[in-house]
Every structure is written in structure tokens, then in C-alpha cells.
Amino acid sequence: MKRIILASIVLISIGIGFSACSKNDSVYNSPVGIAAKINGLQWNSSTTTVTQNNVSGQTYLTITGQITGNRQDNISLTLQNYTGMGTYKISPIWSSASYNYGTAEHTAATGTIVVTNSTATFVQGTFTFQAEDSTYVITSGTFNTSLKQ
């Protein structure tokens, strides 16, 4: 009898767990702003700015997250030829990224920026890159921010 009750409790628990899931659970969800691991340590922006410019027919989207009160500590991502969702390769010719700490700018040598969701009012995605001087490795990067109209 105890086994039947225990099995019933387990099955009910599994059923409740599955019923709590919905198709919207697969939507990318991150805190507003920029977050990443810098050399394995968690980093979260407290403010984020976004600019979108059209230069000679090319759209540039720049997302910068910084720690409030410290303009010398920020992550900046620039997507050249921004067209919405997709993968943007970081290289000197294409899109770029940097981690600025103190007076030093650590520009990315390689990496990717992936826009996973994009509308007329917001953009979300992930990124990873390594600085040219190999001092900093940025992993598990996420961004979720409003676009200015």
C-alpha cells in the first residue's frame, strides 16, 4: 500500500512539473542589461546604453553596459551591418567588442555576438570574446535591452 501511495505522489509531482512548462519557456530570458563572466568572475552592468546609426547604407548597433559610478569599467559590443537576429563574427573588419577596465581598452581579437531575439523595441542575445592581449576572456555573455526609437 505504501508503494502505491509513493508511486502516486511521484506521478502527480511529475505531472505538475510538466504542466508548469509552456512553449514560452524556450524564449530567451536574461536580466535587463549586460552580464558576462570575465576570467570566470561574474560581471553585471548597472546601466546600459544602445545606439543605432546608419552610415553609408550600413546599420551599426552598439550596446554598452557599465557599472554605475565607474565609467572606466564597461563592456561594449558593436554590430556592423546589423540586420536583426543572427550570428555576428567579431574581427577587426566586422563587428567588434571590448572590455574597458581602468584606463586600458581590451579589444576583442576573436569571438561572436549572437542576436537571439530582435524587434523594433528590444534586442537580446549572447556573446563571447577574448581580448587581443589575452588578458581577459569574456564568456557566458548575455544582453537584453530596449532599442531607442
Image (spheres, rainbow, N blue to C red):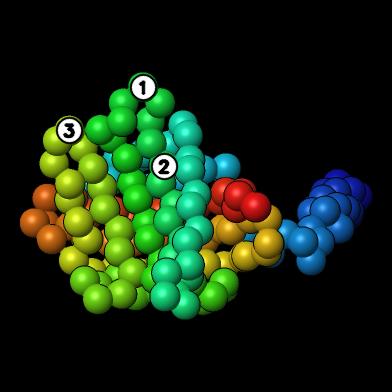
Quarter of the figure with residue 68: top left
Q: How far apart are the alpha carbons under marks 1 and 3?
A: 13 Å
Where residue 102 is drawn, which disc sits there?
A: 3
As drawn, which residue projects farthest toward the left?
133
The crowd level at tag 2 (other Cα within 10 Å; few <14, some 14-19, many 20+) is many
Helix, strand or loop status at disc 2: strand
Confirm or deny contact between disc 2 and disc 3 (CB under 8 A): no
Image coordinates of residue 39 in percent, x first then y, are 23, 47
Going 13% across and 61% down the picture, which residue do you hit? 132
What amino acid is at disc 1?
Gly
As drawn, which residue projects farthest toward the front?
56
Q: How far apart are the alpha carbons under marks 2 and 1?
A: 12 Å
Is 136 left or right of 60, judged from the image as shown? Answer: left
Helix, strand or loop status at disc 1: loop
The foreground one among 123 and 58 is 58
Is 136 left or right of 56, judged from the image as shown? Answer: left
Residue tagged 2 = 65
Report if residue 29 is visible in the image.
no
As drawn, which residue projects farthest toward the top?
69
Report if residue 110 is visible in the image.
yes
Location of residue 113 with respect to 74 vertically, above or below: below
The number of discs equals 3
The crowd level at tag 3 (other Cα within 10 Å; few <14, some 14-19, many 20+) is few
Image coordinates of residue 44 in percent, x first then y, are 42, 37
Going 33% across and 69% down the picture, which residue do you hit? 95
Is 43 left or right of 133, judged from the image as shown? Answer: right
Going 81% across and 61% down the picture, which residue do you hit? 22
What amino acid is at disc 3?
Gly
Residue tagged 1 = 69
